[in-house]
Image (cartoon, rainbow, N blue to C red):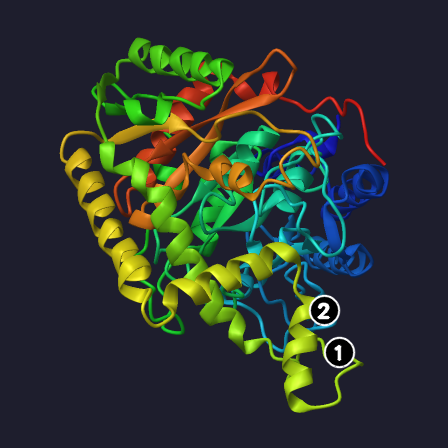
Amino acid sequence: MNITELTVHELQEKLKNKELTITQINEAYIKQIKEKEPEVQAFITDLTEAAINQSKEIQARLDNGEELGNLAGIPIGIKDNICTKGVKTTCASKMLENFVAPYDATVMNKVNAEEMISLGKLNMDEFAMGSSTENSYFKKTKNPWDLSRVPGGSSGGSAAAVAANMLPWALGTDTGGSIRQPASLCGIVGLKPTYGLVSRYGVVAYASSLDQVGVLTKDVQDCAMLLNVIAGYDEMDSTSVDVGEKDYTQALQKDIKGLKIGVPKEFYGEGINEEVKVSLETAIAKYKEMGAEVEEFSLDIAQYALAAYYIIACAEASSNLGRYDGIRYTYRSPEAQTLKDVFKKSRSEAFGSEVKRRIILGTYVLSSGYYDAYYKKAQQVRTLVMNEFSKAFEKYDVLITPVSPTTAFKIGEKSTNPMEMYLADICTVSINVAGLPGMSIPCGIDSQGLPIGMQLIGKKFSEETLIKAAYAYEQETNFREKYKPTFKGGVQ
């Protein structure tokens, strides 16, 4: 039995039957990290030493007959833009290289309340700006399926660590596809919840009206279990929505007869790889076999979402990143002589090129004379996108689209062409613009042996419907047995 290949619900079963101990589980994952991390490069901060002591202490309490929660002692990884008290929270940036968070984010409080054990903080694109995890100040994370390729981004460290069995599950954030796209490229399950379902308090902001914490897991059941942990109203977050207590594992049902599925044809047009299209068509045919009602329709406003997204996201990034001034808790240039130097040199030296690009673009679209032409117009388009999706959900329960136009691309292939990189998000950004839930599940493997993801989109706060649709497909196709990384190739 390979412990690290088990899902969390399988680990729970073995703990319950006393086939495994909490210490054995954590030691197995730590061994896997030592073996695979030199190749994959998913971690920024390693917490495995503390994890061993924590696992022994929890196991001792269990042995003494103490009542513990179902998830006590289960390992987890945390994307490095989620504040963790007493531990570095760097956002993969030189700007926050030595920043130690003085408090826990709300999602961390919830994870800690379950007594899960964090094995480390995970690599990402700097300040979550990117689609490949190549923009990290510290390292470039590799895709476990092929080490010469990217894992996607910005939650690439989280996705790669789960795919490489260095973690059973992880937390990520999604601003324009940053959970779903790496989940697709790494062959795992990724869920971006509805905006407002999960607290953003203590999550370092990139674009406040788009950011959302979500989960990356090995299968759909684990996805529902971890969503149960992190979802819920938080008075510390003014955008948090109270939808009451829900148990998302109740949605793990195989029967989807009568489920109405919409297939927006604009998401299958030019630029979508042929093998991706074929895999999606096969998956959609499977849903028909299972009794779902499937219909193609037009969602034409979605084509404008990418432009609106980058204007809104960059404008909010320009505002949010204004706080990194070299004065308080951030990097300060040793060359600075004057106050003006502190601002100018610290920001110039500590921000990477992609972050600078987005700050400049955001400042431009917010500037006098251009605000109405760009930012205001983008917000108007956002309303149209929301309305178009609302109209679609009057008729359909779920929409199915590709997650990414292609499978994982080579490291360095798109890093010199920002426009090409931005187009990698074309299938995912509209969901953030509209504040909807979106989910990526594996649905195929291309001719190069790389995973292909399918995106399920639901109306606001309909996570149960997405989980039900995803679970039914997972059980029907048994994708966990088919989609396992092979660790092909490699780059130094």
The one of 239 and 332 positioned closer to us in this rendering: 332
Image coords of residue 385 (percent x, y): 24, 44
Q: Quadrant of the N terminus?
A: top right
Crowd around label 1: few <14 · some 14–19 · many ≥20 (10 Å): some
Crowd around label 2: few <14 · some 14–19 · many ≥20 (10 Å): few
Q: Tell me if residue 34 comes above or below residue 294 in the rendering.
A: below
Question: Mark 1 sits on what residue?
Answer: 333
Q: Quadrant of the C terminus?
A: top right
Q: Tell me if residue 225 comes above or below residue 254 in the rendering.
A: below
- Figure quadrant of residue 12: top right
Q: Is residue 208 visible?
A: no
Whether pointer 2 and pointer 1 mark residues with C-beta atoms closer than 8 Å, the reply is: yes
Question: Mark 2 sits on what residue?
Answer: 349
In the image, taking residue 448 as reference, residue 465 lies left or right, namely left
Q: Callout 2, which amino acid?
A: Glu
Q: Tell me if residue 15 comes above or below residue 331 in the rendering.
A: above
Of callouts 2 and 1, the N-terminal one: 1
Q: Is residue 384 visible?
A: yes
SS under mark 1: loop
The one of 136 and 192 positioned closer to us in this rendering: 136
Q: Identify which residue is drawn at 50% across, 35% down.
A: 424
Q: Callout 1, which amino acid?
A: Ser
Q: Identify which residue is drawn at 43% across, 16% down.
A: 277
Image coords of residue 306 (percent x, y): 38, 43
